[in-house]
Structures are given as structure tokens and as C-alpha cells.
Amino acid sequence: MPTSKSSDFKTRVCAVVAKIPKGKTLSYKRVAELAGSPKAFRAVGNLMHKNENPKVPCHRVIKSDGSPGGFFYGTKKKIEILKKEGAIK
């Protein structure tokens, strides 16, 4: 059965995010660019908000201005995790 464009995009986004090392972050925009869809940064945010795969560290994806952006468990928890990993001070 052929895959849809949206599932291909999700696969590419998850592959990019899975490679973000501990202590580092990428912006939603940069993830979209690396996934081959530079204008799809909002879609990246929506995918990351729904992510339940622990191998895809969605907390490491932040806004272009350096602010944390959203997180399923809340922004406070996202900041806490990023501080613990050394990505922010």
C-alpha cells in the first residue's frame, strides 16, 4: 500500500529529530528544512506536540527566537528537561 505525503513527512521529521544530540536543540524551522519542507515549520510543531515515541526527543525542538515553544507536558517541563540535558541554562 502506498504511503501518503503526510506520513512520509512525519517519517522524515522524526528521523531529523531523533538525531538531535542531548544538550543540543534545533528550531522548528530548521527541522522542517532538514526534512525537505522548509515552509512546514508549523506542521513540525504539530507533529512534535503529538509525539509519543521516546526515541524522538521532541523537547529538543524550539522556536527560532530561542524560546522553548510548546510541549505536550507543558513548557515548564520542557525547560526543566532542556536544563537537565545542558541545552539551556
Image (spheres, rainbow, N blue to C red):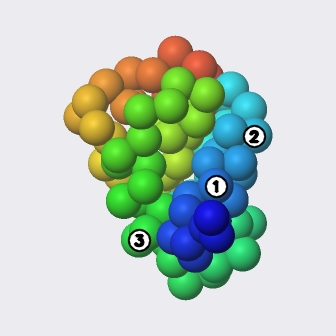
Name the image quarter holding residue 87.
top right
Rendered location of residue 78, percent (x, y): 38, 31
Name the image quarter holding residue 73.
top left
Q: What amino acid does circle 3 point to?
A: Arg
**Earlier sequence position, callout 2 versus callout 1:** 1
**Circle count:** 3
The residue identified by callout 2 is 19
| Residue 24 in the figure: left or right of residue 70 | right
* C-alpha span from label 2 to label 1: 13 Å
Question: Does the CB distance between marks 3 and 2 fall below 8 Å?
Answer: no
| Residue 49 in the figure: left or right of residue 33 | left
Rendered location of residue 42, percent (x, y): 41, 71
Residue 33 appears in the figure: no
Image: 41 above or below 28:
below
Q: Regarding mark 1 in the picture, which secondary structure is present there?
A: helix
Of the two numbered discs 2 and 1 in the rendering, the one whose residue sits closer to the viewer: 1
The residue identified by callout 3 is 42
The residue identified by callout 1 is 11
Q: Residue drawn at (43%, 55%), measured in percent from left and top?
A: 47
**Earlier sequence position, callout 3 versus callout 2:** 2
Q: Residue furthest front?
A: 1
Q: Residue drawn at (72%, 75%), measured in percent from left and top?
A: 36
* C-alpha span from label 1 to label 3: 16 Å
Which is nearer the eye, 39 or 62? Answer: 39
Q: What amino acid does circle 2 point to?
A: Lys
